[in-house]
Image (cartoon, rainbow, N blue to C red):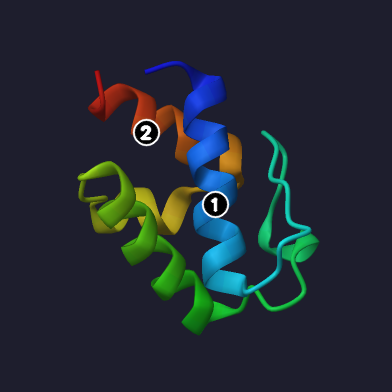
Amino acid sequence: MKREEIFERLNNVFRDVFDDESITVSEKTTSADIEDWDSLEHINLIVAVEQEFGIKFNMGEVTTMKNVGEMVNIIESRVK
């Protein structure tokens, strides 16, 4: 799966979770860039991303992801 396709699918997940059709994520997007992205929504987001891609993040990955680009790296390594 190409990075572009992952970003396309992630955009839909982010728009769904945050109920905001204007969201477009990039490599550098962080929680500071999305108004409602707090710790509770982070959990909802992780679960939604796991469901979308059929993967499971481990706790270390969840706590060390600094931006969407790092999330995409993990997804890319799991989805072939």
Badge 2 element: helix
Task: Estimate the x, y position of residue 17 in percent, counting from the top left.
Answer: 52, 70
Q: Residue at x 44, y 28 (%)?
A: 73
Give, as a three-letter code, the residue at label 2.
Answer: Ile
Left or right: 29 as drawn, with respect to 5:
right
Number of numbered discs visible in the structure rendering = 2
Residue found at the very far front of the displayed protein: 21
The nearer-to-camera label among 1 and 2 is 1
**What separation in Å lies between label 1 and label 2 (alpha carbons)?**
18 Å
Residue 47 lies in quadrant:
bottom left
Give, as a three-letter code, the residue at label 1.
Answer: Asn
Between residue 66 and residue 26, name the one nearer to us.
26
Q: Is residue 33 above or below residue 78?
A: below
Q: Is residue 44 above or below residue 24?
A: below
Task: Estimate the x, y position of residue 4 in percent, counting from the top left.
Answer: 56, 22
Q: Residue at x 74, y 65 (%)?
A: 34
Between residue 22 and residue 59, name the one nearer to us.
22
Q: Residues within 10 Å of mark 2 (few under 14, many from 20)?
A: some
Of labels 1 and 2, earlier in sequence is 1
Badge 1 element: helix
Residue 78 lies in quadrant:
top left
The quadrant of the image that shows the N terminus is: top left
Q: Residue at x 45, y 50 (%)?
A: 64
Task: Estimate the x, y position of residue 8 in percent, counting from the top left.
Answer: 56, 36
Q: Residues within 10 Å of mark 1 (few under 14, many from 20)?
A: some
Q: Which residue is mark 2?
A: 74
Q: Which residue is mark 1?
A: 12
Q: Residue at x 26, y 26 (%)?
A: 79
